[in-house]
Every structure is written in C-alpha cells, then in structure tokens.
C-alpha cells in the first residue's frame, strides 16, 4: 500500500510540475501548482511528517498559491502579449548562463559533505520535547528575523503588483496628464 501511495503521489507531483511549466494559461499553471503541492503533502504524510504536510497545505497551497491566483486574476489574464517581440534581448542568453551556473553549483555541492546531513545548528533533533516544539523554538528565536522578513517581502510583492496593475477607470486622465 505504501508503494502505491508513493507512486500515485509521485506521478501526480510530476504531472503537476510539468503542468506548471507547460500550461499556457497562468490560472491553469497556478492550479497545477496546487496539485503539485498537495501531492508533496501526501508524500510527507507517507513519511510520517504530519506537521510538514499540514504546513505544506495551509501555508503553500492555501495561502501562497491563492495569493498568486489573486495577483494573476488582478493583473488580467485576458490580455494577449506578443511573445515574438523580445523587449530585453539579452534576457534569454543571460538566463541560460545563470541556470548553467546554478546547475554547476548544485553538482559541486552534491559532491561535498553538506548533503550527507551535518549536525543541526539549532540543537539536536533528538531529546525531550516534540518536533513541533523544537521547530517553533528555532523559528521564533534564532530565525525570527528571517521569518518576519519573508512576510514583509510577500506584503511588498502584493502591494507592488496592485500598484503596477492599477488602471484609470474609463480612460480618465490622471492628474499628471491634465496639468500643463
């Protein structure tokens, strides 16, 4: 039974990941991301990592993807873009070079000792207390600044998307266009 759950969840995670990349409609891509995240949550449950599965569903599938869908719908997916015209000519070659550098870095790091499981920086994983208590202690003491900075960045991203997508109603000119 474990093998069947793994195969079904793994295949649906891979299918969802391919759907994220290959879907032409951004809304369909976001929905495929939800499928991928739920499949990963099932894989977490199969590994007895129930807390991670709950975080996967609540935080990622529940909040982040809904935020993505809100921004996608707010920006308007009904507008057609001319994909043949590339406003940033060097963007694709630069993206290729950066992706090759990242791949090289991952391969070099995989050869070193870090992937084998070094000791924890926040303390031993075994000992008294549950996993949730240890994660909460590390998150709200040592990593509190990073946790809060991530939430601030998400808020800034949403505000930026709203400002960029704002249109004047009915073609009314803005204050700057009216003044001489």
Image: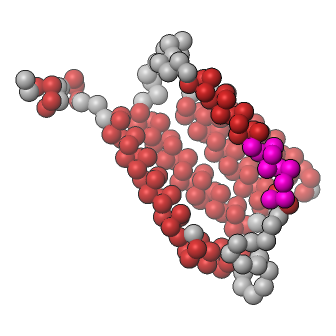
Residue 24 visible in the displayed image: no
On the image, the x and y values in percent for residue 156 come to 40, 50
The part of the image, by quadrant, that contains residue 100 is: top right
Q: Is residue 61 visible?
A: yes
Near-viewer residue (80 or 28): 80
Report whether 101 appears left or right of 65: right
Quadrant of the image for the C terminus? top left
Report the magenta residues as a range: 105-114
Reply above or below: 142 against 160: below
Identified at 67% across, 27% down, the residue is: 96
Identify the image quadrant of the N terminus. bottom right
Q: Is residue 12 above or below residue 156?
A: above
Q: Position of residue 116 (x, y in %)?
A: 86, 60
Residue 111, magenta (yes or no): yes
Residue pictured at 24% horizontal, 30% vertical: 168
> Would you say residue 9 sits in the magenta stretch?
no
């Amino acid at each position: 039974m474990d093998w069947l759950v793994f195969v079904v969840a793994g295949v649906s995670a891979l299918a969802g990941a391919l759907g994220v990349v290959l879907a032409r409609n951004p809304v369909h891509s976001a929905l495929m991301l939800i499928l991928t995240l739920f499949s990963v949550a099932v894989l977490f449950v199969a590994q007895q990592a129930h807390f991670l599965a709950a975080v996967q569903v609540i935080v990622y599938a529940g909040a982040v993807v809904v935020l993505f869908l809100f921004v996608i719908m707010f920006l308007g997916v009904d507008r057609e873009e001319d994909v043949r015209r590339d406003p940033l000519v060097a963007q694709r070659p630069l993206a290729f070079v950066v992706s090759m550098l990242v791949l090289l870095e991952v391969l070099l790091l995989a050869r070193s000792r870090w992937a084998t499981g070094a000791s924890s920086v926040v303390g031993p994983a075994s000992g008294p207390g549950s996993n949730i208590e240890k994660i909460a202690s590390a998150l709200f003491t040592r990593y509190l600044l990073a946790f809060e900075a991530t939430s601030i960045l998400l808020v800034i991203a949403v505000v930026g998307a709203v400002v960029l997508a704002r249109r004047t109603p009915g073609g009314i000119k803005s204050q700057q266009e009216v003044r001489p």
